[in-house]
Amino acid sequence: MPVRIPRARSTEIATFGFAGVAGFAPLYFMLPGAEERLASQTARWAPRWERNISYFATPARRVAQRVEPRVEKTVKKIDSRLPLEKMALNVDRRIKHGIDRMSKH
């Protein structure tokens, strides 16, 4: 019986698209003339981006201001529960102990 592969969802397509862009971008920038092409595209599209970003900027600023106190409170709560300082000191002690042990040999 043939194996049925389910149809890709939009999130999967977006994820694979982003991975492709992120994977091939360094190769694109290694090609000769890439900087000039990028500069010309930026000069062409920047005015549109600046016009469109103003549509999102004000609502995003409002959302950030509304969420910020809750996020700050949550971070403080988590910071007080996590023994980060103790863990950092233990890691530092172990590293120093390992260096001392290796320098004796």
Image: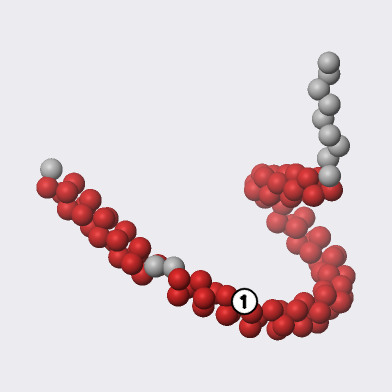
32 is higher (above) or lower (below) than 82? above
Give the side of residue 55 with respect to residue 76, left or right: right
| Residue 88 placement: quadrant | bottom left
In the image, what residue occupies the spot 86% across and 77% down?
Answer: 55
Kindly indicate the quadrant of the structure image that contains residue 64: bottom right
In front here: 27 or 37? Answer: 27
Q: Quadrant of the C terminus?
A: top left
Q: How many marks?
A: 1
Q: Quadrant of the N terminus?
A: top right
> Residue at 23% of width from left, 51% of height from top?
98
- The structure residue drawn at horizontal position 80% and vertical position 61%, both measured from the top left corner, is 40
Identify which residue, 82 or 89, lies in the foreground: 82
Mark 1: secondary structure: helix
In the rendered image, residue 78, in percent from the top left (x then y), is placed at: 51, 71
The answer to whether residue 41 is visible is yes
In this view, the residue in front, 57 or 4, is 4
Q: Is residue 79 above or below residue 90?
A: below
Look at the image and name its color scheme: secondary structure
To which residue does mark 1 refer? 71
| 104, 65: nearer the viewer | 65
Relative horizontal placement of residue 7, taking residue 83 as reference (left or right): right
26 is higher (above) or lower (below) than 50: above
Q: Given the image, on which type of amino acid does mark 1 rest?
A: Val
Q: Residue furthest top?
A: 1
Q: Does residue 47 appear to the left or right of 76 in the view shown? A: right
x, y percent for residue 90? 29, 61
Q: Is residue 28 visible?
A: no
Query: Where residue 7 sits: x, y (%)?
Result: 86, 37
Residue drawn at 36 percent across, 69 percent down: 85
Characterize the local packing of mark 1: few (<14), some (14-19) or many (20 or more) Cα atoms within 10 angstroms: few
